[in-house]
Image: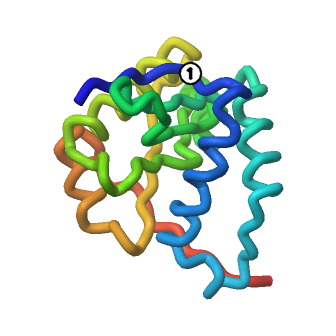
Amino acid sequence: MSYTIRPSTLNDLPELVAMSVQFSNELEVDELNIKYTEQDAYDSIKMIINQRIAVALSVVDEIEKKIVGSIAGIINPWLLDKRALTLQELWFYILKEHRNSRLAKAALKAFEAYGKHGGATHCIMATHLNSRRALERFYKMSGYRHLEHHYIREL
């Protein structure tokens, strides 16, 4: 297979929104009373693509000519050291049938490179419960250290 990792554009919105449906299903956010809507996904993805302090990349299968993955984040100052800018992941998703460590590693490296070009000195990645062990292993193999766990509840 041949893949290209490139900046996401507004033309990618329909494919990225379609992919967000699968991502939402894997996260099982309905149990948290977070109601996924395609319009919200569309608006959020569009906002990320249009922001100068954000990075949004699409992973394109060159044979199928379709987007099979995406990674996005935002660059902001680190709370405890304003000199350090962090690239904080907002989403990282690859369609199940295209998941392999080489593709994920290539997407992560491209994401880090865009962040570094934007002034980021550190990158913060997250996991979700359904794939936590696999992602923790992947991030450790990619040179990441455990920082913290996130918890969520309805207010």
147 w.r.t. 78: above or below: below
Q: What residue does disc 1 label?
A: 7
Give the residue drawn at x 61%, y 52%.
18
Taking the image as shown, residue 25 lies to the left or right of residue 110, namely right
Q: What residue type is labelled 1?
A: Pro
Of all residues shown, which one is farthest toward the left? 141
Give the residue drawn at x 22%, y 46%.
100
35 w.r.t. 49: above or below: below
Q: Tell me the quadrant of the picture where the C terminus can be found.
A: bottom right
Taking depth in this image into account, of 83 and 108 the one nearest to the observer is: 108
Residue 122 visible here: no
92 w.r.t. 66: above or below: below
Q: What element carries label 1?
A: strand
Give the residue drawn at x 73%, y 21%.
52
Q: Tell me the quadrant of the picture where the N terminus can be found.
A: top left
Taking the image as shown, residue 33 lies to the left or right of residue 146, namely right
Residue 22: horizontal and vertical position, in percent? 52, 62
Taking depth in this image into account, of 85 and 9 the one nearest to the observer is: 9
Of all residues shown, which one is farthest toward the top? 117
Residue 43: horizontal and vertical position, in percent? 82, 46
